Image: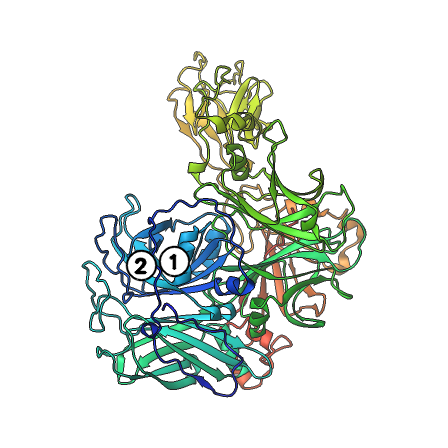
């Protein structure tokens, strides 16, 4: 693949064909031999200044991983690793010394690899990264997109040279995670692909008829055309151009489709089909003058219709490549979204001067494996309860609406095909407005690579009020911690030239100087953060501030909790008797603990009555009869709830006990010896209590008892009476009710109601406390059914929404397909016209379409 850049596609016209002849053997390079060790330390070397063209050429890379890779992966003892079955493809983006990577695995790969490695041309491992799931947005994104994502931080200059010269390889490793063994590998060479800058869709091709068996022995260096020790396959970079004349451009990289005849020219057939309609979009034959063992390229372009473009966006098209005369070695695959691990975010700024405080917000979205749009819109100080959220394509002064988002958080299934090109070209914006008038908030979406570790996503930078800021000033921040304990941050601020006269600070309140560290510009890293800073990020109490003159805080945010690797967190010194140790002093090797010793009492520990408790620990304060638990350095307590007791003899209440105790004997002598133990808590013999659960509090639907004689614990739950109605109609009177009840059957007719009968209206808090639901038109009582209203369409009589136990479920009435074919109209809700937005929510005939409405979260 080295030395064969795929150039950015021009906009193709009617049916022209771009033929690529030759291969990597025709582009032999002068290799610069360098003496280096495979385990070079990643020193903090100076940043090399490059031109814009060099930066662009060094940005986009790709790799194609099959059993025909010319690289033989080797273990530490230089023995070859067997080739693993399957096919994979990788996309890599080099940005500011970091190499972001993403990997797509073929459906035939059942076992997930344990690690991803970068290797030199001799097969020696330079860097190995674990593929263990990282909690937070990283794991959610990988699950929703079927991608593997990561980043190589601070690539050393020696390895950057290998990347530039095409001598760097990537490999997936299989083996035992306990001893990091390598039992199988799938590798490929990394090469430059400028065409990836316009990639919108991709295809991973694997054999239609996979080989029954492959060799299990060590890999072979520089195999020949006749050698077969793994799977063959291909990948395609696909660009779709929308507009008045839609068209497709395909750059296909493949191997293994040719018969085992070295050097002879062959014809290759490329077919793109829509199977569900038995429709062929592309069927072309091209000539490959000199087939190669590991790497061949074809480039094809063709005009398409708008309907075919929609099918492409929804993953309905299939691509196949075969050598004419060798259909048994055909490779096939479905078209899906682009392979890069990309998110799209935007700070939302005010379009006009509003009343104080100014509205602000952020938008985050990405495309999942089904081609659906996953979005999260956060706003603050907006002033309206039902905003109109639209996605708008902005090209200069021309704005055109592309999609409407019904909620602030959700998934838009089957989005318009028009959305992808402006999204990938960063010409798509989020507009939030009222029923009329210009948008109150807007922001243009920009792409960013998925970080290697993060909490719940970006944090909204909020105004502090210490100084008057421009109305259109807003921002967001990303922070992450890698496996080597390095802290990385990236900020985006719009509406102000803040970068020229301000700097960023990380604030943890952990030291005498206030626990503030100056970070510098809009993005960067801290290679060795203190233990206190890492713990503050791990617990979720650190703040990021934009300061002017290092004093005045312009913007501030609380950093979402980051899952810091356990190896980066310091050990906590403590004592077995739960007492504060006055004799503890950090030793010479515990210099980082000196900052942490103060911080552990502020955040990770709580103190009460000369005792300290760990974060999340539960205890009983007998002096105040309270149950307490430690929350970020502050004890949170509530009164003990004593369950009712039914004793054969009068109860007793010994000193130090808050609830009555049953002995069930007139001669029994009470003693604390032999107390019951449950979940690290001790209970007196004969006592009864409700289980205490964090953070919900007491579970009053269960009563635990420590038997006075046997010292055994029993926790039976409340037995609910049988229902006299169906399970569907039953509901809970309030959220903590132990049993469900049936709705009242008797109800007065509307004409019999009087203001006196109606009584005082319930407040929203009372309705929600009784199991009601949040709804755009106001809170719904539990069990209530309504027709929703949309501000631009009025009441939707054909949709019925029902509130049950805090959750709203909406059902739309649908007509049977047979009725529509006979042009019969059952009632006003039976619309048989096939409108585009109706097709987006179609379901099989004679069924109802049920969905759970996401409840928009309040801005934090």
Q: Which residue is mark 2?
A: 121
Q: Is residue 337 left or right of residue 289?
A: right
Number of marks drawn: 2
**Mark 1 or mark 2, earlier in chain:** 2
Dot 1: element: helix
Do the residues bearing badges 1 and 2 touch, measured as CB atoms within 8 Å? yes
Q: Is residue 398 left or right of residue 270?
A: right
- Which image quarter holds the N terminus? bottom left
For this rendering, which residue is in front, 418 or 252?
252
Q: Is residue 105 visible?
A: no
In this rendering, is residue 47 above or below 308? Answer: above
Q: Which residue is mark 1?
A: 162
Where is residue 738 shown, x and y percent of the image?
54, 41
Where is residue 749 shown, x and y percent of the image?
72, 59
Dot 2: element: loop
Where is residue 131 shown, x and y percent of the image?
38, 51
């Amino acid at each position: 693949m080295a030395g064969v850049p795929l150039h950015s596609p021009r906009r193709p016209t009617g049916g022209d064909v771009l033929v690529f002849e030759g291969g990597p053997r025709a582009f032999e390079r002068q290799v610069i031999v360098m003496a280096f060790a495979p385990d070079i330390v990643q020193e903090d070397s100076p940043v090399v200044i490059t031109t814009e063209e060099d930066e662009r050429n060094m940005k986009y890379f790709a790799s194609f991983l099959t059993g025909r890779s010319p690289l033989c992966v080797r273990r530490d003892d230089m023995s070859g690793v067997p080739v693993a079955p399957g096919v994979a493809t990788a996309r890599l983006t080099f940005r500011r010394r970091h190499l972001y990577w993403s990997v797509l695995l073929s459906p035939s790969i059942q076992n997930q690899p344990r690690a991803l490695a970068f290797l030199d041309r001799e097969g020696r491992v330079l860097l190995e990264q674990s593929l263990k799931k990282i909690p937070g947005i990283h794991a959610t994104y990988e699950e929703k997109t079927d991608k593997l994502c990561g980043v190589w931080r601070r690539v050393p200059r020696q390895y950057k040279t290998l990347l530039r010269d095409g001598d760097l390889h990537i490999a997936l490793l299989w083996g035992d995670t306990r001893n990091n063994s390598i039992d199988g590998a799938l590798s490929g060479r990394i090469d430059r692909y400028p065409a990836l800058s316009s990639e919108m869709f991709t295809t991973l091709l694997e054999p239609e008829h996979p080989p029954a068996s492959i060799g299990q022995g060590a890999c072979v260096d520089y195999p020949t055309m006749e050698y077969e020790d793994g799977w063959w396959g291909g990948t395609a970079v696909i660009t779709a151009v929308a507009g008045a004349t839609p068209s497709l451009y395909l750059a296909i990289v493949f191997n293994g489709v040719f018969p085992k005849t070295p050097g002879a020219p062959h014809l290759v057939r490329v077919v793109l089909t829509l199977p569900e309609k038995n429709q062929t979009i592309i069927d072309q034959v091209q000539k490959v003058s000199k087939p190669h063992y590991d790497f061949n390229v074809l480039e094809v372009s063709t005009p398409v219709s708008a309907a075919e473009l929609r099918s492409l966006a929804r993953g309905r098209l299939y691509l196949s490549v075969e050598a004419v005369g060798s259909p048994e070695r055909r490779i096939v695959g479905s078209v899906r979204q682009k392979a890069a691990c990309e998110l799209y975010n935007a700070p939302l700024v005010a379009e006009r001067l509003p009343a104080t405080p100014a509205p602000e917000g952020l938008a985050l979205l990405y495309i999942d494996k089904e081609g659906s749009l996953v979005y999260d819109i956060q706003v603050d100080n907006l002033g309206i309860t039902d905003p109109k959220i639209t996605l708008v394509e902005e090209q200069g002064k021309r704005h055109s609406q592309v999609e409407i988002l019904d909620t602030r958080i959700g998934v838009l299934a089957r989005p318009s095909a028009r959305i992808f090109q402006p999204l990938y070209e960063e010409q798509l914006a989020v507009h939030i407005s009222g029923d009329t008038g210009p948008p109150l908030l807007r922001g243009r979406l920009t792409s960013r690579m998925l970080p290697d570790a993060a909490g719940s996503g970006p944090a909204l930078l909020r105004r502090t009020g210490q100084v008057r800021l421009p109305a259109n000033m807003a921002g967001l921040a990303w922070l992450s911690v890698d496996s080597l304990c390095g802290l990385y941050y990236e900020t985006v601020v719009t509406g102000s030239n803040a970068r020229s006269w301000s700097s960023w600070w990380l604030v943890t309140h952990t030291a005498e100087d206030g626990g503030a560290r100056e970070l510098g510009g809009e993005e960067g890293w801290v290679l060795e953060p203190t233990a206190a800073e890492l713990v503050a990020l791990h617990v979720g109490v650190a703040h990021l501030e934009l300061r002017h003159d290092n004093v005045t805080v312009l913007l501030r945010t609380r950093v979402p909790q980051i899952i810091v690797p356990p190896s980066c967190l310091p050990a906590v010194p403590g004592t077995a008797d739960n007492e504060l140790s006055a004799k503890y002093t950090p030793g010479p090797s515990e210099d980082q603990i000196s900052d942490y010793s103060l911080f552990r009492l502020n955040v990770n520990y709580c103190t009460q009555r000369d005792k300290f408790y760990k974060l999340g620990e539960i205890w009983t304060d007998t002096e105040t009869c309270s149950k307490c638990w430690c929350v970020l350095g502050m004890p949170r307590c509530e009164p003990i709830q004593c369950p009712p007791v039914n004793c054969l003899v009068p109860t007793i209440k010994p000193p130090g006990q808050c609830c009555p105790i049953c002995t069930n004997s007139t001669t029994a002598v009470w003693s604390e010896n032999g107390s019951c133990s449950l979940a690290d808590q001790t209970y007196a013999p004969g006592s009864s209590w409700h289980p205490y659960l964090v953070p919900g509090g007491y579970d009053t639907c269960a009563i635990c008892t420590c038997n006075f004689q046997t010292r055994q614990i029993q926790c039976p739950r409340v037995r609910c009476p049988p229902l006299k109605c169906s399970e569907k109609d039953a509901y809970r009177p309030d959220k903590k009710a132990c049993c469900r009840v049936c709705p009242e059957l008797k109800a007065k007719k509307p004409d019999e109601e009087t203001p006196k009968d109606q009584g005082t209206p319930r407040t929203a808090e009372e309705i929600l406390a009784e199991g009601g639901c949040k709804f755009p038109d106001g809170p719904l009582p539990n069990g209530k059914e309504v027709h929703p209203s949309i501000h631009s369409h009025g009441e939707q009589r054909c949709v019925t929404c029902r509130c049950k136990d805090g959750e709203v479920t909406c059902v739309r009435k649908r007509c049977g397909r047979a009725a529509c074919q006979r042009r019969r109209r059952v009632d006003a809700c039976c619309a048989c016209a096939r409108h585009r937005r109706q097709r987006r929510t179609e379901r099989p005939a004679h069924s109802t379409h049920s969905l759970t409405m996401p409840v928009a979260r309040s801005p934090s």
